[in-house]
Image (cartoon, grey):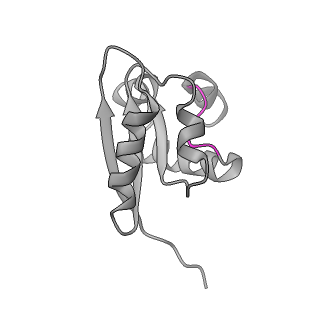
Amino acid sequence: MVQRRCFSNLIELKWFAESLEPKHIGSFYFKVDGKLGARGVAIAMNGYVSGVVESVAKGKELKVLLLDGMHLSNVIYGHYTFPELRDHTVKCASLSVSSVLPRVQSLVANTF
C-alpha cells in the first residue's frame, strides 16, 4: 500500500530591491511551522544573500523551499507549470538536503 502525504502550500513572494536576508526567511519559516501539514515556498524576485540557505536548513526540518524570480518567470512564460516546478523542487530538496532549486536553465535543459 502506498500512502501519499498531503501538504498545504503556503507561498510568499518577496519583491524587494535587494536580495533577501535570513531574517526574512526565518519569519516565513515560523509561519509555515505553525501550520499543520504545511510546506512553504518562498519566492524572492531578486534572489537571496549568502547565508540564507544555511540558515533555513541548519538544525531544522526542511519545510521551506527557496525559489527566485527566474523560476517564477519560467512559469509565467509557460516553460513549465507551477505544480511541475514545485514537485521538482521537492524532489531536488529531498535528494540533496538543500532547500534551493538549481538555476532554471539547467533545470529546463535537463528535466522538462
Answer yes or no: is residue 65 visible.
yes
Looking at this rendering, what residue extends furthest in the bottom direction?
A: 1
Is 100 covered by the magenta stretch?
Answer: yes
Choose between 8 and 76: the one closer to the eye: 8
Q: Position of residue 70 (x, y in %)?
A: 45, 22
Q: Where is residue 71 in the image (x, y as percent from the top left)?
A: 45, 29
Residue 86 position, x and y percent, is 47, 46
Q: Nearer the viewer, residue 23 or 7?
A: 23
For the N terminus, the quadrant is bottom right
Quarter location, residue 38: bottom left
Q: Residue at x 41, y 39 (%)?
A: 25
**Farthest-out residue, right:** 96
Q: Which residue is drawn at 36% across and 55% down?
A: 32
Please, is residue 23 above or below residue 56 in the view?
above
Mostly what secondary structure, the magenta segment? loop
Q: In which quarter of the image is the C terminus?
A: top right
Is residue 112 shown to the viewer in this render? no
The residue furthest top is: 17
* Boundaries of the magenta span: 98-103
- Residue at the location (37% across, 23% down)? 45
Magenta span contains residue 77? no
Q: Where is residue 15 in the image (x, y as percent from the top left)?
A: 29, 23
Q: Quadrant of residue 23?
A: top left
Taking the spot 59% from the left edge, 46% from the top edge, the residue there is 57
Numbered disc total: 0
Locate residue 34: give its quadrant. bottom left
In the displayed structure image, the side of residue 104 where residue 44 appears, left or right: left
